[in-house]
Image: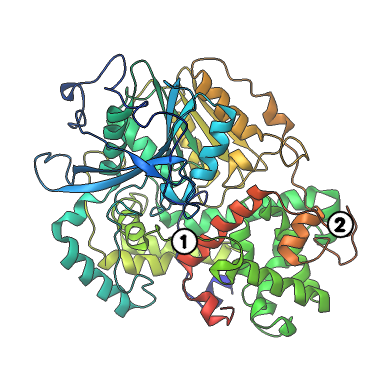
Amino acid sequence: MTHAKRILVAVLFGIAWAGGACNSGGGGDADAGDGDGGADASTDDDLAYPVTGIPAEWFPCSFIDGEDDGLAECSSTAMPLFWDDPGGQTVEIYAKRRLAAIQPAEAQMWFLHGGPGASGCEGLPPLMDKIQALYPELDVYTIDHRGVGDSDRLTCPTESMQDEEELAECISYIQDEWGDGLDAYGTSFSAVDVAAYVEATRAPGQKVFVWGGSYGTYIAHRYVEIFPEQADGIVLEGICPADSSFIWSSEEFDKAGKRLMALCADDAYCGDKMGKDIVESVEELYQSLYTYHCQEAGDARYYVPYMAMYMLYYHPYHNAVPALLYRAMRCNDEDVDALNHTLYMLFGPDSTFMDLGEGYSDVLYKHVVYSEMWAHPDFPDEQSLMQYFAEIESEAVFGTGSGQYMYEEWEVWPRYEDPTWDDKWAETATPMLMLQGVLDPATGYDRAIAVGEHFDGPNQTFVAFPTAGHNVSSGTPVSEDPDAVHCGRRLFVDFIKDPTAALDLSCVDQVLPNDFEGDPALADLVFGTNHLWEDASGKGPAAPAPPPAEWLETLAELRSRIRRDMPNAARDLGLE
């Protein structure tokens, strides 16, 4: 019996990256970055959709939501609801920017969030800030793709949709509220919105770059599919292929977890603690947790598989997964306290660490996934799909086990179709940097490789990191100094400074191995102890230093995932 069969709460997984909010203003005149499409301004005759001539007016707002910092500018710009009907109904599309201190800036970069369903204006300013600090001549922009945040967020009174009745109520509500307009809330028109904003803001001669993380890579690919020549460069991180499907979610999670365990087995410290047959030991652990083992830990014992799965997402938390499993296996009094500390860290009230924001839309998530990112020709009928799910469930230890649940939702969801652009590969000579973690459980490495194989032209570079998860730019350390620039982020900035130059990839081999023993700051954050594995410190000072701010930003994203996937967990666990 796999742990997927013992799940107490139905889990529906999304794919995303980062954490933040919507109010901004930037170092320069309010109109300094606005332009007419650059030195080689486009005309609508050159483009697939009429994106030129749409005015974007900007007003002061906060860069980090809720801080009233006045460091950015925002725009709510009317775009066609259906881009193939430009004279029809409109929808307000919300964007945020922080201009470079000296104008005109050399380049602008658009940051596209994932999910589907996550708000760029809430979630991406911390990343935007770090990239702009490394390239001060850069204007940074982000957008709430249509249906999320302040871009006409799709919602319903029963958005948690925990059972069939609530799902039916939500479907009925959105059909009444949006009607046929629901068909406009897909990836392609979100990508066109980005192109329209680029045309409205690009200064003459200014370079344009687009970064996408997770589902944001899917939007970025669609953008370059529709507009193969508008941007000067594309950066993809945590990559979705053109034919992405959530059908593979359990398989990708399981591969990532088993790859991490293999690295643990090969590590002197971790292998000594866990032995060589780690996967078999974990499977036995999961069986025992749901019967007799570690009853002193209360509900925390049931959630060990969940905690391990979520911590797989991001550096440095994936480095603590073996220690989490070891503590659950040993389960002494200190381990019981540690497991409950982790449970509260991940599933406790939203106010524990950071405000998670209100821009995410689970309705938009389902709408895009079930319309574009579910059905796949590998599974032509229900029988083949159910057979695949059964095989994965029988083999998976770290899989989500949500396939059957998602299939039942897919059957009833009011889906749209996009035969013009969906499931097709872009053809472009635009320079591209593709950053992928081999340990990524959300956008699996084995399928991301196809993106690198397709985009293999001049200045199109695919880089895989064996020790990285879903956050390559902040999960590829080359130094134990927490302030040192990670390799993925260094390549990111080098690329946008000169997208046609040969990239220096030497830092890839300098990325530190996974630190499974862990430093005291990580142990204190994850377990409330000063050592990941033991209660007497075996490494570092007894009083750990505060964790780096970036760890807390990543933790906020991790917690936001849990809120989306298991919205009632904190209440059901009595942690509120």
In the figure, 189 relative to 497: above or below?
A: below
Viewer-nearest of labels 2 and 1?
Answer: 1
In the figure, 205 relative to 243: above or below?
A: above
Residue closer to the observer: 525 or 135: 135
Name the kind of residue labelled 1 in the image: Phe
Residue closer to the observer: 401 or 437: 437
Residue 185: where, in percent of width, then height?
A: 25, 51
Where's the N terminus, which quadrant? bottom right
- How far apart marks 2 and 1 lie (CA) works out to 33 Å
Residue receiving disc 1: 13
Earlier sequence position, callout 2 versus callout 1: 1
For disc 1, the neighbor class at 10 Å (few under 14, some 14 to 19, many from 20) is many
> Which quadrant would residue 306 be assigned to in this image?
bottom right
> Which quadrant would residue 483 be assigned to in this image?
top right
Q: Is residue 242 visible?
A: no
User: At 27% across and 49% down in the image, what residue appears?
Assistant: 186
User: At 35% across and 51% down in the image, what residue appears?
Assistant: 373
Residue closer to the observer: 469 or 108: 108
Q: Give me the disc on residue 343.
A: none
Residue 486: where, in percent of width, then height?
A: 66, 35
Residue 153: where, in percent of width, then height?
A: 30, 57
For disc 2, the neighbor class at 10 Å (few under 14, some 14 to 19, many from 20) is few
Name the kind of residue labelled 2 in the image: Asp
In the figure, 257 relative to 493: above or below?
A: below
Residue receiving disc 2: 272
Tag 1 secondary structure: loop
